[in-house]
Image (cartoon, rainbow, N blue to C red):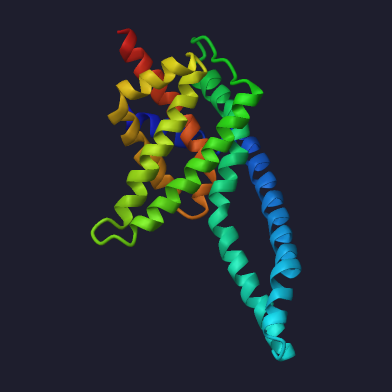
Amino acid sequence: MIPSAARAAASRLFSPEFRSVFVKTLGLTLLALAALWFAIEGLFEWLAWPWIDAWLPSLPSWAGWLGFIVAGIGLALGLALLIAPVTAIIAGLFLDDVAEVVERTDYPGDPPGRAVPALRSLVLAIKFFGVVVLGNIVALLLLLVPGINIAAFFIVNGYLLGREFFEFAAMRFRPEGEARALRKKHAVTVFLAGLVVAGFLAVPLLNLLTPLFAAAMMVHLHKAISAREAA
């Protein structure tokens, strides 16, 4: 089920319908990152620099410029790490669009799913953001533990991403409690599918497409599991 779901999802990523969602997601992500850049830069100039100047009043003038350059580089690296989480929260607002495309084009004879209510969709988007951030923080901490390293990234993200995206796909057809119970019943399958999503997340630039790929893949996986359950 998992290879078939992954292939089907990947084949749709660059279709015109998905492309429009990706362009909206990427555009809003860039706007959010630009706003975050200016906000953090303004806070640094307002709060941090006067404090540094007060403690080190004898700094030469060039040191101030050097400090701003170093701070700018640090901020740029920080924003680079935030690209995937910010994309996740924004893409979370468009996941129903992705699911509808998959259901309409690949399962035209099946009843369509119901869009997640707007408020619940916002909550899910925030959860996706939190999952990506938490997963990567935990993975980074585990990188310090000998013998775990890269495996930590895949295990943590595989579990968290598999859980959240599968339940999203299932909730289009089931109550939330039933979707969660189905995920637990097929926990190993969902986790292995999550590992595929984590592999997608690990590839720079390609990780911008992770929410769209994961949503499409889990729609296919949920359809396959539901068909097996009904047989």
Q: Find residue 5 and report its image quarter.
A: top left
Q: Is residue 162 above or below residue 84?
A: above
Q: Is residue 115 above or below residue 205?
A: above
Residue drawn at the location 56% of the way across and 31% of the way down: 124
Q: Residue 201: give x, y in percent of width and height.
A: 45, 47
Q: Quick one: quadrant of the N terminus?
A: top left
Q: Residue 30: give x, y in percent of width and height.
A: 67, 51
Residue drawn at the location 61% of the way across and 65% of the way down: 76
Q: Looking at this view, is 112 or 122 the one in front?
A: 122
Q: Find residue 156 and report its image quarter.
A: top left
Residue ranking furthest to the left = 147
Residue 84 in view in this figure = yes
Residue drawn at the location 60% of the way across and 25% of the way down: 120
Q: Residue 162: give x, y in percent of width and height.
A: 40, 34
Residue drawn at the location 57% of the way across and 29% of the way down: 98
Q: Looking at this view, is 217 or 130 the one in front?
A: 130
Q: Residue 86: give x, y in percent of width and height.
A: 59, 47
Q: Is residue 228 above or below residue 33?
A: above
Q: Quick one: quadrant of the C terminus?
A: top left
In the rendered picture of this protein, how many numbered marks are placed on residues? 0
Residue 224 in view in this figure = no
Residue ranking furthest to the front = 55
Q: Is residue 228 above or below residue 136?
A: above
